[in-house]
Amino acid sequence: MYCKKIEVENFRNIERAEVEFSEGVNILAGANAQGKTNLLEAIFYPSMGRSFRGAKTTEMIRFGEKQAEISLFYRDRKRDQRIDVRVYREKLRQVEKNGNRVDKLSDIVGSFRAVLFHPEHLSLIKSSPQERRSYLDMAIGRIRPLYIHALQKYNHILKQRNALLRNAVTDRRAFDATIELWSEQLSVAAAELSVMRYEYILRARRFIGESFSEMTGEREIPKVTYAGSSGQKESEYADKEKTRKKYFELLMSAHDREIAVGATLWGIHKDDLTIDLNGHRARIYGSQGQQRSLALAMKLAEGEICREEYGDYPVFLLDDVLSELDSERREYLLHRIRGKQVILTGCDPDLMKGEDEVRRILVQNGTYSEIG
Ligand SMILES: Nc1ncnc2c1ncn2[C@@H]1O[C@H](COP(=O)(O)OP(=O)(O)O)[C@@H](O)[C@H]1O
Ligand SMILES: [Mg+2]
């Protein structure tokens, strides 16, 4: 799969741009605050239906404008494809795939597939569980569009249950009447998502191990484990029904405590991954270099699983990542993504000098021009 062209209008600092990409390495070079990340954000948006920066749609519309437009042209399984997105300040966005209106997000997620690397991903091992959960959500969503749907449903139920817990003090009656129902629904949704997270990790584990040892040549063996909040052993998450029962039991076990904190204490919003090296927590005992290699390996696994699932690699989007890596890890990353389409940003115009077949695009104040 590769991205042939993007047309953007009134997106961030880009008034209007049309940028073509080569099938190999594309470098967006330019000084700070010129629109390098903005363009990557526009390319990524159609792939997951959201900003990788976590921005609200209105933040992406150019200051003073009412709407922003993205048209992405890509090639998938020997066919030309196109996704059009229009976002508005005042109304819901519109998405079209090949000219047909798409209403559900899960109908375009997985169509244009991109894996995004951000410098913050390099601290995936040390960062908060929340970051690791978003890593999982992005990675699984790409190969299981229905996961996104299930996650939205879960979050909706969770919100209702949390509201019920917060209002319990003033309205105990409503609480007693409905808590069992909400707990039941939440446990069903949690079990469904848990299984998918568990299966994804099981699949990613091998790739992570391979990349890590190739990259470091170390004999230490990494192991990434799905750590759900139900207290079950990892392998027990394979059994959806058992997991549902367990969640339900927990969600009915400590209402007073949940009311006191005003939040649901169990569920996939509490999940984490444990990442070990030779049996020791990498977050605590790993060197900084090991942690970064592990994080890189986890990101590369996304590309491998995507290939396993769809038969080809996704587009790799690298936002300021190369400059953050030491030469060994940089070499390794470049070696791994060779032959795939890569769109990367950097300040250094001489980045990857000497490599042929690199398309260089100079970014200046929201404009993009190819450098010969
Ligand atoms: N909604 C917006 N409208 C207009 N300009 C914006 C908007 N959002 C961000 N910008 C501008 O985009 C610039 C940052 O672009 P960015 O792509 O992040 O820079 P870089 O080239 O360093 O990656 C800043 O000057 C910022 O003011
Ligand atoms: Mg940037």
Image (cartoon, helix red, strand yellow):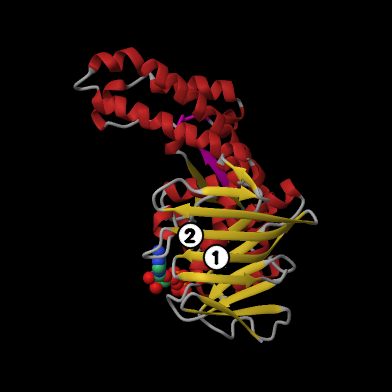
Give left or right: position of 178 versus 199: left
Instruction: Locate the C terminus by quadrant.
Output: bottom right
Which residue is at 52% across, 70% downward? 16
Image quadrant holding the N terminus, namely: bottom right
- Mark 1 residue element: strand
Few, some or many residues within 10 Å of mark 1 (<14, 14–19, 20+): many
As measured in the structure, the alpha-carbon distance from the residue carrying label 1 to the one carrying label 2 is: 8 Å
The answer to whether one can see residue 290 in this image is: no
Magenta residue check for 260: no
The answer to which quarter of the image holds residue 215 is bottom right
Q: Is residue 307 left or right of residue 283?
A: right
Return the residue at label 2. Answer: 68
In the figure, is residue 51 to the left or right of 296? Answer: left
- State the residue at coordinates (46%, 45%): 92
Q: Earlier in the sequence, mark 1 or mark 2?
A: 1
**Do tag 1 and tag 2 residues touch (Cβ < 8 Å)?**
yes
Q: Give the range drawn in magenta.
A: 224-232
Q: What residue type is labelled 2?
A: Ala
Q: Toward the viewer: 146 or 339?
A: 146
Please name the residue that numbered disc 1 is placed on.
8
Task: Please name whichever residue, 9 or 31, is drawn nearer the observer in this view of the structure.
Answer: 9
Instruction: Work out whether 223 lies above or below 212.
Output: above
Q: Residue 82 placed where, x, y %?
A: 67, 55
- Please tell me how many numbered marks the rendered image carries: 2
Mark 2 nearby-residue class (10 Å; few <14, some 14–19, many ≥20): many
Mark 1 is on which residue type? Val
Name the quadrant containing residue 166: top left
Q: Position of residue 184 (x, y in %)?
A: 45, 19
The x and y percentages for residue 229 are 45, 33
Residue 18's disc is: none
